Amino acid sequence: MDSPAPQARGFPRLELWDPSVPQEFMQPKKEINDGSDLTRFFTTNAYRDIGIFLMQLNRSLCPRKRPDDTVQTFELSRKREDSQSVLSLQALLGRVEALIDDAPPDPGPRRFGNIAFRKWHELLGQQVAVLLTEFLSREIMMFGQDMGECFVKEDTEEAGKHGVVGPFAELESYFIGSFGSAQRLDYGTGHELSFLAFLGCLWKLGFFKDDTRTREGETERSIVLGVFEPYFKVVRRLILTYTLEPAGTHGVWGLDDHFFMPYIFGSAQLTRPITEEEPMPLEGSVPGAPKPADVTKAATVELYREENMYFAAIGFINDVKKGPFWEHSPILFDISGIKDGWGKINKGMLKMFDAEVLGKFPVVQHFRFGKLFSWDVDPNAPAVQHTVHTVQQPVAPKSSAVPGVGTAAPWAKHQAAPPMSGAAALRAQPAPPNPLYSEASIPASTGEIPGPLPRGIPGTASAQHSITKAPWAA
Amino acid sequence: MSDLDKWVAQLRACRPIPEADVRELCHKARELLIEEGNVVTVNAPVTICGDIHGQFHDLMELFRVGGDVPDTNYLFMGDFVDRGFYSLESFLLLLCLKVRYPDRMTLIRGNHESRQITTVYGFYDECLRKYGSANVWRYCCDVFDYLALGAIVLGASNTLSPASESSAAQEYADMNLEVEVCNADGVSTFQFPRQSRSLTSSSDPQPRGSPNGSSSTAGHSSPATGNKTGPPGSGASGSSGGSVGNPAGAVLCVHGGLSPLIQTVDAIRLLDRKQEVPHEGAMCDLLWSDPDDIDGWGLSPRGAGFLFGADIVKEFNYKNDLSLIARAHQLVMEGFKEMFDASIVTVWSAPNYCYRCGNVAALLELSEDESGLGVFARSNGDVSRSDGGQEKGRPNGFDTLEGPARRYRVFQAAPQDSRGMPAKKPVADYFL
């Protein structure tokens, strides 16, 4: 890597807040209202923190070379000593899943998404305050507040009078946002991102400090394998129970109808082993790993889906889709042809996530910003170049939308459009949705198409060009 | 073999034609489409199809079930592209058939036949991947702008011709069916005879809005006289009949539905359609709206178009002397769904949509009226021109015209065994 590592040797970790300092929190707000807001987003503390936390979790899953030359891998099924904090979150997710029993799918006429999901979401909304209070420690709920005043949902009005908002407001917002849209009866990568933010908030508030294990990455590994995977399981059950639609879709030309992060974490689990000092490998696989090509073999996928998050995600696709894999999932099929191992795939997934999730207006327009994931500009953020990608985003959403399902107009206000496009899209960005619909928004007839985005997830070659100083550069 | 026949053959084999040929094909298609009105007139018999969404193998299955072109006269109601793997092959084949057999193939525009939508929902990505440049996408989008917005079917009979050649025509005529549902092998699975109006009351509530889930398993059924229940989920009521044997009213075909800005079929004819689908206005609504169990107009969850209720449909049909509106645009698990006393039907032709929805698909056949009265006696939407289309003796509520006899052929996704695994393509830049 040709960039000066900002924290020599030390790989960036999400900063912990000091509990002894009084903190202000706020009700998280939507800030990304049109395409041009994306430019600012890339310079915010929130963008930086999302990146740091994701990289931190990603790195923890990479197999480790131990001093005695043994290699340690981190399968889903491997026994872990999860800390109390992780166990609490598992219990929380269990309770959330159990709400399904109280909102059975509606047997009546429907198109696709089941309206009973609205009932489920309503139950979640009613119980979230109680659930979070029950499973998160008092220290977290009262973080940075005057002792004796703990404002949870019921107290919001009261809190408002005092002009005080506790961390609950932010935790609740991300948590509720993690389980799909009741309005649209769909689920997509924006919801997945919200769960990452929820865990990131907890990290910052020191929730995971109870983990006394000292080995590098152990806490993070527990978070991914012990919280994220159970979360994916709950969401998969929601998708199956209520036939939730993909939140916008490129059809077969997207990576996956609903998820992205399992492909990041799952590929990390299979990369070439590293020592605690080494950066993430950019290629290579751990000895004994299934081959990337094995994802096209249903039987092999069955074999590994209980061990590996990538295979678990593919297994779910195989569960719900009928037809040739290469046809319904051509992007994953092509990726299965990569010869340089899971390290290469992991690196690519991170870059793709940056461009296709964090870089896509239809996805991140729904992200809310508070104090923990803040819209404030990070003074160390590099200048973001105006790319065609950012300037051609919608200028301002015009129409309003109400509950329903089906193809949404990309300019519809509340409608999440596809998070991920076919891989080819990065090479050549078409004119994205533009409510003006002018001829000018159509790619020029010369066929000249803008090149790849200059941004990228640090730790990758392209990233080094544009955000060498990004705090989350490994 | 002409170029055109060569292209048809190649596309039928699911192989894209070279970029230069696409350009030429699109040019020819545009010259043809530019001559069409916004509302194309189509004479029965005709087979009406809904969304395809790039499901090429299922389109082949549709042709197997519905008959090949040019033997069968087809009308496709848009949404040829996006979501599926073969938007390109599907659209180009339909376009080729249109150019080759212009009188046997009618294509109207869906909301996905748009630059903006195709960049979000997959067709753009597909073209780039298959050709390495966006040129073909651009040629296709230029054709989209010329597609008609709707069609009027004239001369549809209110009796059905036999579902297969093995049945005697007279036998069918005697049964006087209003609705028949057939499976992919042409076997009739449900029949519903037309009821005489005197036997029924038109105010009876209909099972509107319910899914026609059991239609494929209902088996042979001959409801007793006076039974007003059509195929489950169909609006077949038996209450819409006039005297048997009179020609059915005209059928309007449109991708989405109605618009609050459009009161007459003539108003559609006056639109300037040769443009990208606008974000609002009449043209947008025709391609985006959905019928719903509401009164009047409602806001659409899609962020474009509107929701419209039974009262809107009935008034529109009455004013325009239509007996039925056929539209697509919404996934229907059972392939078709009649609503509002059979005044409007949704036809969906993409089985197991997106490889996961588990739905069946359907096409709608309207037979030709052979009484010799049909085409001349019925309106094609020109009704009341002389009085501005406004005033007309209006009974309480709008008596719906007797609908044409309707045969739905329901089919499943094409078997996959014939599809070999292709070579892996180079991955995106992210992975280089």
Image (cartoon, coloured by chain):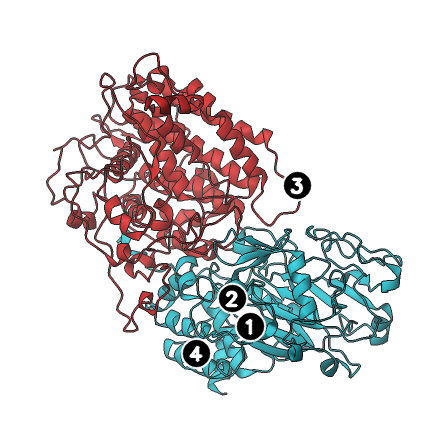
Chain colours: A red, B cyan
Q: Which residue is mark 3?
A: A107
To the question of a shared chain for discs 2 and 1, the answer is yes
Please identify, in this view, whether the residue under mark 3 or under mark 1 is nearer the observer. Answer: 1
Q: Tag 1's secondary structure? A: helix
Instruction: Report the Cα–Cα distance between label 2 and label 1.
Output: 8 Å
Q: Is residue B231 above or below residue B25?
A: above
Chain letter of the residue carrying label 2: B
Instruction: Report the Cα–Cα distance between label 1 and label 4.
Output: 25 Å
Q: Residue A229, position in %: x, y? A: 42, 33
Instruction: Report the Cα–Cα distance between label 3 and label 4.
Output: 46 Å
Q: Which residue is mark 1?
A: B268
Of mark 1 and mark 4, the one earlier in the sequence is 4
The answer to whether B310 appears left or right of A29 in the picture is right
The amino acid sitting under disc 4 is: Cys
The quarter of the picture where the N terminus of chain A appears is: top left
Residue at 30 percent across and 24 percent down: it is: A219
Q: Which residue is mark 2?
A: B282
To the question of a shared chain for discs 2 and 4, the answer is yes
Please identify, in this view, whether the residue under mark 3 or under mark 2 is nearer the observer. Answer: 2
Query: For the residue carrying disc 1, how many other residues have a C-alpha within 10 Å: few (<14), some (14-19), or many (20+)?
Result: many
Instruction: Report the Cα–Cα distance between label 3 and label 2.
Output: 36 Å
For the residues labelled 3 and 4, say whether their Cβ atoms are less than 8 Å apart. no
